[in-house]
Structure formats: C-alpha cells, structure tokens
Amino acid sequence: MSEKEKKDIPAEEVNTEPAAEEVKEEIKEETFTVTREQMEKMEQLAQMVAESGDKYLRLAAEYDNYRKRTVKEKESLYNSAKADTIKPFLDVYDNLLRGAAQFAEDDPNRQGMEMICKQFIDVLAKLGVTEIEAQGKPFDPERHNAVMHVEDEEIEESTVVEVFQKGFIMGEKVLRFSMVKVAN
C-alpha cells in the first residue's frame, strides 16, 4: 500500500497491533544449559545472598535496639540529675514557709513571703515537680512517711490527719516523702 492509500483508510480500520508471529517471537524465552557444577555454584551464591540479607536485618535490628536503649538511658540520666538538683531546694521551700508563718496574717512581710513561696511552687511545677496531697487522704507507704499515730474513732483508719513536712514527686519518682501523722 502506498502512503496515499494509507491516508485514505479510516483510523478505525487501521490495525496497529503487531502480527501474531511477532508476538510469538517476543514471548519465546531463551533457555540455557547449565552444568551440575555451575548449578551448585549458583545455589551457593544464592545461599550467601540470603545469609548476607539475614545478617543485615539482624544488624539493623541490633542498632535500632541500641539507639532506643541509649535514648532511654539519656532520659533517665537527665531526670536523675534534675531530681538531684531539685532536692536541696525543697529544704529552702520549707524554710520560706516557716518564715512566712512567723508573721501575722495581715502583715505585708507575710504576704511577700507567701508570694515568694507561690513563685517557688510555680517554678517547681514547670520542672514537673508536684506536691503530694496527703491531708485527709488514705495513708500510702510509697508516698508518705508516718512519724506519728493517733487513736481517733471519728476518723477512718489509716487516714492522714496531719502533715508535718510536704512531700514532692516528679513524674512517678518520689523526691521527698510526706512526713505525716496517721489515725489508727
């Protein structure tokens, strides 16, 4: 067919698919003959590749575990250092409270000391330190240190009736136990 004749045929009638013979030639795969020796060598190579892949996966998992462990250790070390730094300041807080208690209720010096105490508690809160609530709560040996007992039938057994020294926690770690009086 000439080029002019091809132009005259409508597009729907033109067969753009390759001939069946061409498709058969493309589908044919080449086959090779391999000796037993070559086959054994290919199997060994395949086994080496599989072992290398397994070693790589184990090494990657080991590294990931190492990374997670070191991050956890760093965080633990940071929290321990922070707790050790904060503990001495709790005694300063106690002294501020004692100083404020020495003044009358309406004394401006007392109000100033109370403002300092509030600021101190706010700074501790920013560091993640909170006061252990004890007054009127059930005695918890993991957070309270009972230094006195009182017999009182009106109060429920093992209830904190008085707090001598406030306790503080940082997260789940107790920085200082509350010193309390407990009813029996």
Image (cartoon, rainbow, N blue to C red):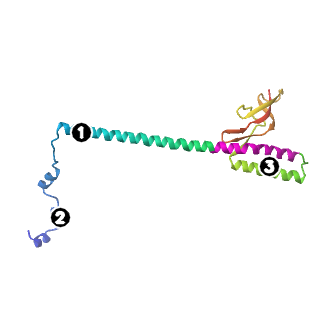
Which disc number belongs to residue 41? 1
- Place residue 35 in its image quadrant: top left
Give the CA distance from mark 2 to mark 3.
Answer: 91 Å
Residue at position x 28%, y 40% in the image: 46
Query: Is the residue 181 above or below the residue 18 in the image?
Result: above
| Left or right, residue 16 beside residue 137 | left
Please tell me whether mark 2 sits on a helix, a strand or a loop. Answer: helix
Q: Earlier in the sequence, mark 1 or mark 3?
A: 1
User: Between residues 161 and 179, which one lies in front from this camera angle?
Assistant: 179
Residue at position x 80%, y 31% in the image: 147
Q: Earlier in the sequence, mark 2 or mark 3?
A: 2
Tags 2 and 1 in contact by the CB under 8 Å rule? no
Residue at position x 16%, y 47% in the image: 30
Question: Magenta segment range?
Answer: 78-101
Near mark 1 (Cα within 10 A), the count class, few <14, some 14-19 or many ≥20, is few
Q: In which quarter of the image is the C terminus?
A: top right
Near mark 3 (Cα within 10 A), the count class, few <14, some 14-19 or many ≥20, is some
Which disc number belongs to residue 117? 3
Total marks shown come to 3
- Under mark 2, the amino acid is Glu
Which disc number belongs to residue 12? 2
User: Between residues 116 and 105, which one lies in front from this camera angle?
Assistant: 116
Give the CA distance from mark 2 to mark 1.
Answer: 55 Å
Residue at position x 63%, y 45% in the image: 78
| Left or right, residue 101 beside residue 139 | right
Query: Is the residue 135 above or below the residue 108 in the image?
Result: above
Q: Is residue 60 inside the magenta stretch?
A: no
